[in-house]
Image (spheres, helix red, strand yellow):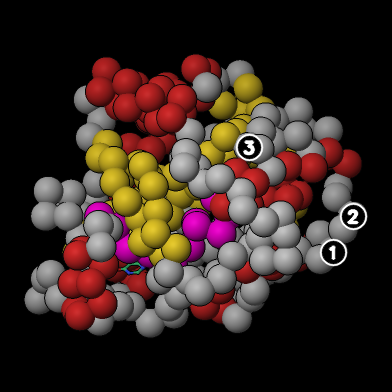
Amino acid sequence: MKIPDELINCRAETAIVLGSGLGCFAENLPQTFSVDYGAIDGLPVSGVPGHAGRFVVASLAGQPLLIAQGRVHLYEGWSAQDVVKNISLMHAIGIRKILLTNAAGTLNSSYLPGSWMMLSDHINLLGASPLSGGPNFVDMSHIYSIRLRGIFLQIAKQAGIPLHEGVYAAMHGPQFETPAEIRMLKAIGSDAVGMSTVPEAIQAHALGMEVAGFSCLTNWAAGLSPTPLSHEDVHAVGQDAAGQMIELLLKALPKI
Ligand code: HPA
């Protein structure tokens, strides 16, 4: 994989991966460089609306920040190994702290659509792992960094930004879940459901990176509201909620 020199030399230690509808985050920051995933040999490109597919080097609170605008998913037909190529690239250029964002349905009656949930843990129901073929038996007891979670919780509290914590269940998709699947997910301890993030978190943790995960809760999960689910609604709620995440990151990044 030939990585552009501007990325290799970007000096960022922290990266954020933006999920559905959150791409606008990058547009609000001064940018120094951007490159489309398609221009980097070997990096998969998403065809899903709302996933721009580029790396942006931006400046936030005086520090370089690498933004991965969009990701690829298992449900598009990519393998778990393909889905984490962005993570290996970011690790290779010196990223050591990674913030993964996604859009998700909420299963927790106290976590309203339009709010954010930080991942305390996940349940991998994708039927795949990026680590297949090795390394084996990597410990996942603390996949989401306790240190980063503590910083984000403290800053959210000080800033008056609501930030829930909970368990994210990863489903393969591309279809939304059935109400019966949502009842099962609730019974096994999930607070939110989505179709991404978990392979990236596993890969980043296995590479020794500090990981934090954030779900923008865009809708009630299937069967919990009379409204049918649509990708367009998910996208619109994500865009509205991006402002809160920008505020949180502006305050948190200098401290992480
Ligand atoms: N289910 C799965 N993925 C999602 C959802 C959902 O309800 N909302 C946003 N991404």
Ligand 1 neighbours mark 3 (CB distance < 8 Å): no
Mark 2 nearby-residue class (10 Å; few <14, some 14–19, many ≥20): few
Instruction: Mark 2 vs mark 3: give the one in front.
Output: 3
Q: Is residue 235 left or right of residue 31?
A: left
Residue at x 70% of width, y 30% of height: 12
Residue at x 17% of width, y 55% of height: 108
Q: Say if mark 1 contacts mark 2, CB within 8 Å.
A: yes
Pinpoint residue 65: horizontal percent, then vertical percent.
Answer: 62, 33
* Type of amino acid at the residue the image marks with label 3: Met
Give the residue number, with chain letter if any, for mark 2.
2
Give the residue number, with chain letter if any, for mark 1.
41
Relative depth, front residue between 90 and 248: 90
Kind of element beneath mark 1:
loop
Give the residue number, with chain letter if any, for mark 3.
209
Quadrant of residue 20 within the rendered picture: bottom left
Mark 3 nearby-residue class (10 Å; few <14, some 14–19, many ≥20): many
Pinpoint residue 128: horizontal percent, then vertical percent.
Answer: 56, 71
Instruction: Mark 1 vs mark 3: give the one in front.
Output: 3
Mark 1 nearby-residue class (10 Å; few <14, some 14–19, many ≥20): few
Q: Earlier in the sequence, mark 1 or mark 2?
A: 2
Q: Earlier in the sequence, mark 2 or mark 3?
A: 2
Pinpoint residue 43: horizontal percent, then vertical percent.
Answer: 75, 63
**In the rendered structure, which segment of residues is drawn in magenta?**
191-201
* Type of amino acid at the residue the image marks with label 1: Asp
Kind of element beneath mark 2:
loop
Q: Say if mark 2 contacts mark 3, CB within 8 Å.
A: no
Q: CA distance from mark 1 to mark 2?
A: 6 Å
